[in-house]
Amino acid sequence: MRALRLIAWPYHAGLRDVGMGAGAGALARDEGLRAALAAAGCAVTGETIPPVDETRPEVARIFELDRRLASRVAAAQTAGAFPLVLAGNCVSSLGTAAGAGARGVVWLDAHADFDTPEDNLSGFTDVMALAMLTGSGWRALRETIPGFRAVAEEDVVLAGVRDLEPYQRERLKASAVRTVPGAFDRAALGEALDRLHESVTRVYLHVDLDVHDAGSGRANAYAAHGGPSAAAVLDAVDAVFDRFDVAAAALTAYDPEADADGAIAEAARRIAGRVAGRVVAARLR
C-alpha cells in the first residue's frame, strides 16, 4: 500500500477550530474521507499541527503555523508518505509548498488570493496567499518558513477564478499567472496545464473547496456562482496527475456551517479519494 500522511491545519486567522479552521478539523475526523483514502489503497497516518499562543499577533501566529506545517510536510516526504493537507485557510499553502519542494502550483479557487498588503481592502490575510507564494508581500516572514522559495508567477495555473473586485481583476491581469476562469472546460484547462508542463514537472495541487459552483454546494460564506461542477473538479484533479509529479495536495476553506446539505463534505471525500487513487497509481508505474 502507498503511505499517505493526512496533515490537519485547523486554523482560521491563526485561531484553532473556528470558521474554516473547524472545517479542516471536521474533514480530518471524517470517517467517510478516511474510508475513501483506504479504499484507494493508501495506508493512512494522521497528525495535527499544534496551536500557537493565541495572544500573539495574527500574522505572527499564521507564519509560525506555516513553519510548523512545512516541517511536517517535509518529514512526511522523508518517510515516503504523500502529504495531503486539510487546512482552514489558503495561506497554509506557504508551508505545504515549502515542505514539499514544489516548483509549480495548480490552484483551484473561486478567488485569486492575489492581494498584497499595499492593495488589500478587506484586512483578510488569507486573500494574500497566492501573492505571497509567488513572492509578493511579507518577504521577511516568508523567508522564515523552512524550504520556502517563491514560485514564479508563470509557473502557476489558477483555475475556476471568478469572484474578484475590480482592483483584484486588474492585478491578476497584469501578472504572469495562467488563468482558466469560471466554469472551465477540459480543453481550456488542459491547454494551460500543458503550457505549465513546459517549465515545471513537480507541482503542488491546491483545492480551495469554494472553487465549486455555489449551485453544487457552498463551501463557505464566499461561495460564488459561475464555477465548475463537482465532476469537473474531479476531472481537473485527474488532469493535473496526468501531467505532473504532484508533490503534495491540500483541501482548504471548508466551513461546515455553510454546507447545509453536506454536498461539499461529500465532494471533499471524493476529491481526497481521487487524489489517493492517483498517488497509488503513480507509485505503481
Image (cartoon, helix red, strand yellow):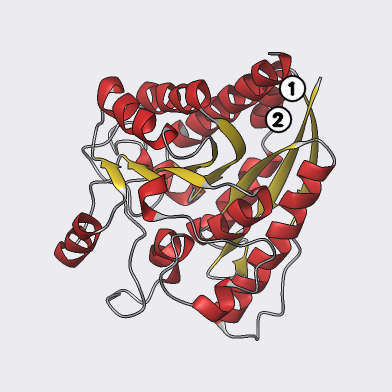
SS at badge 1 = helix
Question: Mark 2 highlights which residue?
Answer: 34
Residue 273 percent coordinates (x, y): 61, 24
Identify which residue is drawn at 45% across, 62% down: 129
SS at badge 2 = helix
**On screen, residue 54 above or below 158:** below
Identify which residue is drawn at 65% across, 27% down: 32
| Distance of label 2 from label 1 (alpha carbons) | 6 Å
Q: Please state if 132 lies on the left or on the right of 189 as rendered.
A: right
- Mark number displayed over residue 38: 1
Q: Are marks 2 and 1 in contact (CB under 8 Å)?
A: yes
**On screen, residue 250 above or below 125:** above
Q: Quadrant of the N terminus?
A: top right
Residue 151 percent coordinates (x, y): 48, 55
Residue 225 percent coordinates (x, y): 23, 40
**What is the number of callouts on the image?**
2
Few, some or many residues within 10 Å of mark 1 (<14, 14–19, 20+): some
The amino acid type of the residue labelled 1 equals Ala
**Which quarter of the figure has residue 4?**
top right
Q: Nearer the viewer, residue 50 or 238?
A: 238
